[in-house]
Amino acid sequence: MTEPARSEGPPPPDPLRDREQTTLLKRHGWVALAGFVAAWVYVALLVFPPGSTADAVSVPTVVGLTYDDAARRLSDSGLKASLGESRLSGEAPRSTVLAQTPAAGSRVPRGERVSLDVSAGQERSSIPKLIGLTRAQAEDALRKVGLVTGRVTERADDHARGTIILSQPAVGQVVPTGTAVDLVLSAGPTELSMPDVIGRNLAEARSTLEQLGLAVGEVAYDSTSAAPTGQVLEQTPAAGTQILPGATVILRVSGKP
């Protein structure tokens, strides 16, 4: 007699096997999470390097623009303009941007304010009185008011040789500080009348003659003269003689060498 077939049910629970499966699932989960975190960090560092943000922008160059133009350029880049220091400038017209903070090329968050230092206008100076001064005196006068010496030329003139007879710009004009001022020096007249230096002391006579572009030659002394020592007694050429610049004048003076 054959025994009836028995139906097989689910295997009985195996606690050890269940624990192994749970541990394996947890292990796979941690590995997957670690992989995701590593991939996220890699992408973050590659796309957004340290020190940058997804919404950072580059500061454009605005130095040299007017403040209004600079503000528009910054706005187009997602930034805002902020008025900084206002100072006089030797060259830049009023409202020209002289400096910016942060500097051009910096990476900053969108909406950041950029401080702009602007020109309050050009410093200006008045051409001082120069006519009649020597070149050295004129250069010193220009330097004291913030101006510089430009081209220096000479031309024949009745003024004493080596003195200023003209400046460009002219005396009294107001110009930007740092402007170069051209000077014209007297080369002395093309022909002059010999001045009268008799009765003057030797130092005064020599100075007068040299200012006219004349040279003092050998000085003869007269120890028998009753005139004060060093006084000019005689001159050659005589006073009133028409002579050329550079001519040599011979003097006789009282006293001893």
Image: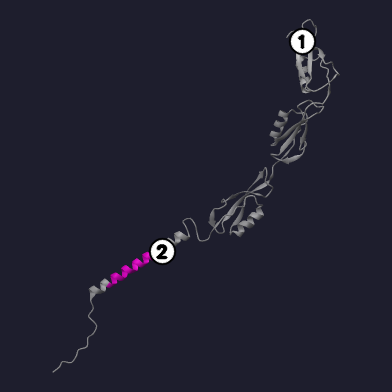
Q: Is residue 12 above or below residue 51?
A: below
Image disc number at residue 167: none
User: Residue 21, located in which quarter of the rendered image?
Assistant: bottom left
Q: Secondary structure at mark 1?
A: strand
Instruction: Give residue 93's position: percent from left, percent from top.
Output: 69, 47
Q: Residue at x 54, y 56 (%)?
A: 108
Q: Which residue is at the front of the view, 219 or 5?
A: 219
- What quarter of the picture does the N terminus occupy? bottom left
Answer with the quarter of the image where residue 38 lies: bottom left
Furthest residue toward bottom: 1
Disc 2 versus disc 1: nearer the observer: 1
Residue where numbered disc 1 is placed: 220
**Which secondary structure class fits the magenta region best?**
helix
Whichever of labels 2 and 1 marks the residue nearer the N terminus, that label is 2
Residue 248 picture quarter: top right
Q: Marks 2 and 1, Cα distance to the nearest angstrom?
A: 107 Å
Query: Within 10 angstroms of label 1, few (less than 14), some, or many (20 or more) residues?
Result: some
Image x and y of residue 17, in percent? 24, 74
Which residue, given by chain and number where applicable, does mark 2 sit on? Answer: 39
Residue 88: percent from the left, percent from the top?
A: 67, 44
Left or right: 84 with respect to 187?
A: left
How many other residues sit within 10 Å of disc 2, few (<14), some (14-19) or many (≥20)? few
Task: Please tell me which residue is depicted at 61% across the width and 55% down the height of the picture.
Answer: 81
Q: Which residues are magenta?
A: 21-40
Q: Is residue 215 visible?
A: yes
Residue displayed at 75% across by 13% down: 218
Task: Report the quarter where the C terminus lies.
Answer: top right
